[in-house]
Amino acid sequence: TLQALLFDVDGTLADTERDGHRLAFNMAFAEAGLDWVWDEALYGQLLAVTGGKERIRYYLDAFNTHFPRPDDFDAFVKGLHEAKTRFYTQLMAEGKIPLRPGVQKLIHEARAAGLRMAIVTTTTPANVTALLDSTLGPGSESWFEVIAAGDIVPAKKPAPDIYAWALREMKLSPQEAIAFEDSGNGVRSSVGAGVKTIVTVNGYTKDDDFSGAALVLDQIGEAGNPYTVIAGGGGR
Ligand code: XBP
Ligand code: MG
């Protein structure tokens, strides 16, 4: 029987990528005196790799191969990413990004119904706190039994490790949970861990491969702003 809802964060709870993460990366690059600018189109390609530090490395490997790498490259990436996290959490504290339609209602109703909840994301833990504080309210993080985030597992999504970790922490079998995801990488991770998955797509992910998802919707939706089924939902 269903016991828990497992929520991805970026793209699922809120559209944080374009006007949150992307801007914060660019602010960190500018602060460091780098002339790198990630426009919306490039960022769409960079989303192929999850994790901010991993994304910076991917950018240099695939899109900016001539950049002379400093001797301590790991520390350089780490420093840039720390600055990015500082800018991102500032943007969230300013309330720049709202929850997607229906998310707040779903979370409140799940809580009222006694369902257990967890966050399962590749983003940095501080980013999760900043978003939840600014949207669901200060302290709302405590509504989630487990915050599975960031570098807690070395292999980020699309690897199933982060979902497996959360299930283990909660002593749940995959059949006792439902995951909410927005991207192909997220679905590969959740479905890879054996968790039934509902997808709500967004502009960056609408053409992703959602094989294995139970249901693909445009949004969770709410009264006056209902969801549209994109795929699945038939039978069973
Ligand atoms: C989200 C991500 C994250 C953020 C950046 O993927 O890819 O990497 O863009 O976060 P998902 P950090 O929604 O599948 O979890 O910079 O903090 O790593
Ligand atoms: Mg996501």
Image (cartoon, grey):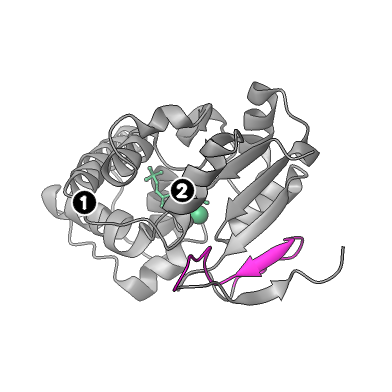
Q: Which mark is residue 64?
A: none
Q: Nearer the viewer, residue 21 or 176?
A: 176
Quadrant holding the N terminus: top right
Identified by mark 2, the residue type is: Val
SS of the residue at dot 1?
loop
Quadrant holding the C terminus: bottom right
* Above/below status of 33 relative to 3: below
> Which residue is depicted at the point 52% across and 45% down?
109
Residue 199 visible in the displayed image: yes
Measured as percent of width and height from the top left, residue 133 is found at 29, 38
Measured as percent of width and height from the top left, residue 156 is found at 56, 42
Q: Between tags 2 and 1, which lies in front?
A: 1
Q: Which residue is mark 2?
A: 9
> Which residue is depicted at the point 38% across and 66% down?
43
> Which residue is depicted at the point 59% across and 38% down?
113
Q: Which residue is mark 1?
A: 95
* Above/below status of 193 relative to 147: below
What segment carries the magenta color?
208-224
Q: Quadrant of residue 7?
A: top right
Q: Nearer the viewer, residue 90 or 86?
A: 90
Mark 1 residue's CB less than 8 Å from ligand 1: no
